[in-house]
Amino acid sequence: MASMLASADAVTAGGAWLVLALIVPVAGILAAMLAGGRHVARIVVVVVLVGFAVAVAIGWQMLQSGSELVYWLGGWAPPLGVGLRADSLSAVMMVITAVVVAGITIYARAEFRTPAGVTEARAPYAFWIMLLGIWCGLNAVFVSADLFTLYVALELLTFSAMPLVCLDGRAETLQAALRYMIFALMGSVLYLLGAVLIYGAYGTLDIAQLGQVTQADAATVAACVLMTIGLLAKTALFPLHLWLPPAHAGAPPAASAVLSALVVKGSFFIVVRIWFDAMPGVPGLGAAQLLAAMGAAAILFGSVIALRQQRLKLLIAYSTLAQIGYLFIMFPLAFDPAVGAFVRGDALTGGMLQAMSHATAKAAMFMAAGLIYATLGHDRIGDMAGVARVVPVTVLAFAVGGVALMGIVPSGAYLAKKLLLGAADGSGQWWWSLVLEAGGFLTASYVVLVIAQALAKPAAPIVPRVRVARSQEWAALLLAVCSLLLSLAVLGPVPASLISNPLAPKELLASAIAIIGGALLVLAYSRELPRFAIVDRIAGLLRPLRGALCALAQGFVRIDDAARQWSIAGLSMLALTLMFAAAMVLQR
Amino acid sequence: MTETTLLGLCAAVLVGLGLFGLIVNPQPLRKVLAFNVLGGGVFMLFGVVARRGAAMGFGGDPVPQGLVITGLVVSFAATALAVALILRLYAVAGTASLRADAIDATTAPADDAGGGDAAAAPRRN
């Protein structure tokens, strides 16, 4: 009881900023509804500027005070009231979300312009309102101090994200949206079921209070498993990804960027909250190994299948699948056997950094893909040779985003990989180092394929269908460069020795090896090959080997097709539930 | 068997039925109904938890009631949204099936997939 009373006083000076972070996007939505479709883009620009300032202010206050920001709504402290609480994880995620939203806003102003002479057009109006809805949902996810508020935030996120999937109203996008909606609903109701069990066992849903009292008894283990599985279904971690590829590949480019860069991070963030903050001692190492194994499978399947795609947007969607897997490698590395709990340390920092660099890089890559589509009128990888001659800045943005994802100095992914490798060495879990290193090559493979094809000589000179707006190209490049320079931004709390000179021979060699490894993978089993004479010659030499590897890769595609059947995904969900429960119970 | 245990078992049965329907039924409308059954089980469990918390002379713990009301609103909104989506899919495609091969999707999307033209997406109803 004493701790409850103590925490009741703990409303911090900057706490009101957290309320602003939620109010600003909602105020924007209300204003847009009053003002109507013609003015919505202008209103969003104002909201983005204000929201960006709020996110930076929250980050700045946290840097200054070095402690959490807390706000009790209506002055009621938990367990009766609900609170908003921002720690360093919330602050960095809010800032990076604001950056990505700003980049997407610049890009989408050209794509979602209300046509002249029309007072309101459906798609632009819906896009801008849903963008603000997603932003509000994400901020709510980042600052909620309470498991039930997190549920509401999660639903706000899904309800705002779903319309973006089917924005252009074609039948297959509507179907993709429906699959997403129903699977996500199943995930969120499982999460809610877990929350009920937690309330029944402890009489509070406040995360900080739970962190002090949760024990690994039957009810808590059941709750932890249900919440985790529900959130994994929403995050689309392999093999619970049945909705992701069609949803992310079918949406308009700006919407894909939002969905891929931001929306999946919301449910991922809640997994982190539960495993690290609400019940750090409950899941145990075995469950974390299982989670990371799913991540490793996601990296393997996502990357291999990405290379078997004919369309650029599907390639990027499968790359998202692989990158989601990356986010879950950190869990076993963050487990401290001495305490028997998950502790915040280098592994968590690495994992969050990976999430941030993926958010910026993937948004840039989807934007670039959209511009390539607009220029050529299609996004078939086989027919886009030479597109770099027409839209060099766009291809540069894609390349920079891809290089950042591959983990080349000084990108955020590079630092993330260093931190995770360090944690893997420290805890003796060498197999995750292998996964991380192999993941670098796999990521390089699909980036190399697209870049090489874009640089190849076109069969006939390309006549662009439309001239893409300069602002769109630069918005994509801006986000890609953000991702590439991310490690410099977080230099503060990280040992300086981890960052080395990008032009030092050692780093150049590592980068070259990653790219050459990626190129070899492209030669080995890519469906489309870049149009270079030398590539044809090497592929000809390797024909028997390549045939076998292509057949193997096609097997991965078949497994993925099967895993995305509704009934199989449902059964995998049940099987994983049992496996997680077994892992957590056997840990005792 | 006490009243609370009985209610708890009912909730478990509803959750099981709902999960079964969500996984097994191919029809999206039935999936949405199954989601509601599953949700009903979860809300009933909230009631059980509220009853168990009635130790201090109250009829029950009021907090779960507040949570249930919010949960009901959210799940009602979700149901409405999902049904609207099913209707729209049926209007555009002539079927509401979730199977990927039920819709004659072209391998590449129509050329006018950009935002500005999207308002003029086909309306075949």
Image (cartoon, coloured by chain):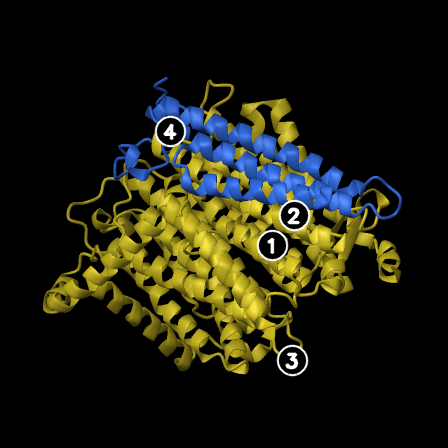
Chain colours: A yellow, B blue
Q: Residue at (67%, 76%) from the top-left corner?
A: A339
The residue wearing badge 1 is: A270
User: Which quarter of the rendering shows the N terminus of chain A?
Assistant: bottom right
Disc 4: host chain:
B
- Which residue is label 3 attached to? A338
Neighbour tally class for label 4: few under 14, some 14-19, many 20 plus, Cα within 10 Å: many
Q: Position of residue A577 (x, y in %)?
A: 51, 56
Residue A242 seen by the camera: yes
Numbered disc in front, either 1 or 4: 4
Which mark is in front, 3 or 2? 3
2 vs 4, front mark: 4
Q: Amino acid at mark 4?
A: Ala
* Circles 2, 1 touching at the beta carbon (< 8 Å): yes
User: Residue under circle 2?
Assistant: A150
Q: Any mark on residue A333, and which?
A: none
The answer as to whether the residues below labels 2 and 4 share one chain is no
